[in-house]
Amino acid sequence: MSSTSIKVTRAAKEHAAHAPRICQLIYESALQRGAGIARRSPEYIAEKIASGKAVVAMDGDKLVGFSYIECWDHGDYVATSGLIVDPEYRHLGLAGRIKECTFKLARERFPYAKIFSITTSLPVMKLNTRLGYKPVTFSELTKDEQFWKGCEGCVNYDVLQRNGAVRCICTGMLYDPEEARPNRSRLFPVLINLKRRLKNLFLKTRP
């Protein structure tokens, strides 16, 4: 099977009809891995699609992949969630294409937000790393209670509760646009050097 006929694009309103299928794929993926993807309702998925916060992979009229974004803490954080690929279409590089499209969508809609992901999937962790995410503790992620409430449908929710919501089976990963700025690494040493010079000048001129 070739991936050349598969189109990865931002979801449009007409894709909301695929919401039940998306929920089924999310559930089946969780069962297969024996770990935690929080369950979502078709209404929840349809709302993400309608609001322009989702990405789909389509083979003609057949939905074969999906992911979505959601902002938290008044837009300070954006989560990328629900990345799934139809089992028949795996190993074609679709997960990477979907992840890149979702990442671009998040960067365009919320350019100053920190983008984060919590996942148990090693392939997703590798994709995140390629895009500039770094592993972090949950303390560096959103504090929005509604986000963590979404974990209640996960099979590992009791683990999160037992650990005071600071760690779980999932790994937290974060992309900070401030740290990713290309000039940051060069500018920071210059500012430090300038601060030292000003301090030395002050000490020399001090009576």
Image (cartoon, rainbow, N blue to C red):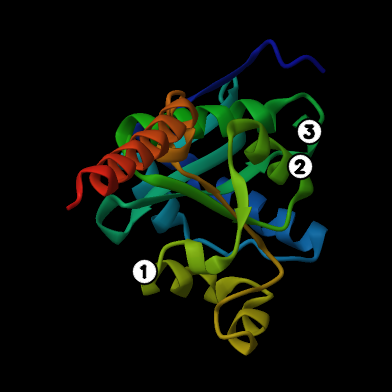
Of mark 3 and mark 1, the one earlier in the sequence is 3
- Mark 1 and mark 2: Cα distance apart in space: 27 Å
Residue 63 in view: no
Which residue has dot 1 on it? 144
Rendered location of residue 38, percent (x, y): 58, 65
Is 37 situated above or below 175? below
Which residue occupies the foreground of this view, 168 or 198?
Answer: 198
Question: Which amino acid type is marked by label 1?
Answer: Asp
Q: Residue 89: name its quadrant.
A: top right
Residue drawn 57% across the image and 64% down it: 39
Q: Residue 23: name its quadrant.
A: bottom right
Residue drawn 46% across the image and 33% down it: 189
Question: Which amino acid type is marked by label 2?
Answer: Pro
Which residue has dot 3 on it? 90
Q: Residues within 10 Å of mark 1 (few under 14, many from 20)?
A: few
Which residue has dot 2 on it? 123
Q: Residues within 10 Å of mark 3 (few under 14, many from 20)?
A: some
